Image (cartoon, rainbow, N blue to C red):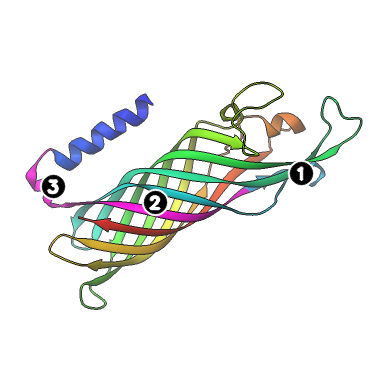
Amino acid sequence: MIRISSMIVVMATVLFCSQEAAAQVEIGVKVSPSVTSTRTIAKDQYNFKNEGAGVGFGLGVIADYFFGTNYAFSTGLLYNVKGGEVSYSYKGPNDLDKKPYSDDINLQYIEIPVALKLFTNEVATDTRVYFLAGGSLNTLLAAKVNDKKVDNDSGDKFTKRFNTFEIGALLGAGVEWQLGESTKVFGGLSYQRGLTDVDDDFYSGIFEDNKVELKNNTFSVDLGLKF
């Protein structure tokens, strides 16, 4: 939380320290319904597989800092829900042989996107297309497995199963419309691909294989307003 607080202070200082800087910044809000899933990396013998996508949701504050007419540094502070269902074969402490298991994973993050946003010239009246490329620095807030926050066997919160920090690659594109002197609306699509393992030695511990990994995928529809 200290790291997040420090980054928020830095962002606020950059955005509001002078009228000149503020004139170059567009601040807004965004909502992002999404389709989320997990990517499993493991040997075939573990049967550790993705069993389908889930529905996620994101929302938060965004800021585009322009350093040219068509170029901006894009960041923000977002709340995002990710996850998916995984299945695996495992011989538990009370099992005589391997049994099939499945986990419906729900992970909630605070995210700070760090990206370059490129705008075209007007393709129609008051209409521009944008492209987004960069990354996202994510901090885990809460976790659920099979709609539970606590493991009934150990009594531990499920957040202990997952790494606190995640880094993702971010790509997107969309259209922005000018509605007034400083008001704009936008809509687009984005894809965030998790680059780091979110498993904190739980699944790798089950299989006794530190090469087992679990990573996030998120496809989002981005809708927002800037003012």
Q: What's drawn in magenta, residue-wise?
A: 17-38
The numbered mark, 2 or 3, whose residue comes first in the sequence reads 3
> Which residue position is annotated with label 2?
134
Q: Which residue lies furthest to the left in this view?
A: 19
Q: In this view, does 103 lie above or below 55?
A: above
Q: Is residue 187 above or below residue 40?
A: below
Q: How crowded is mark 2: few (under 14 residues within 10 Å), some or many (20 or more)?
A: some
Q: Residue 43 carries which label?
A: 1
Q: Position of residue 118 (x, y in %)?
A: 30, 61
1 falls in the magenta region = no
Residue at 7 percent of width and 45 percent of height: 19
- SS at mark 3 in the image: helix
Dot 3: few (<14), some (14–19), or many (≥20) neighbours within 10 Å? Answer: some
| Magenta-drawn stretch, dominant element (helix, strand or loop) | strand
Q: Residue at x 51, y 33 (%)?
A: 142
Write the residue at 15% across / 60% down: 182
Numbered label attached to residue 22: 3
- Residue farthest to the top? 155
Q: Depth-wise, is mark 3 or mark 1 nearer the camera?
A: 3
Amino acid on which disc 2 is placed: Gly
Identify the image quadrant of residue 78: top left
Mark toward the start of the polypeptide (1 vs 2): 1
Q: 147 or 131: nearer the eye?
A: 147
Helix, strand or loop at label 2? It is strand
**Disc 1 marks which amino acid?**
Lys
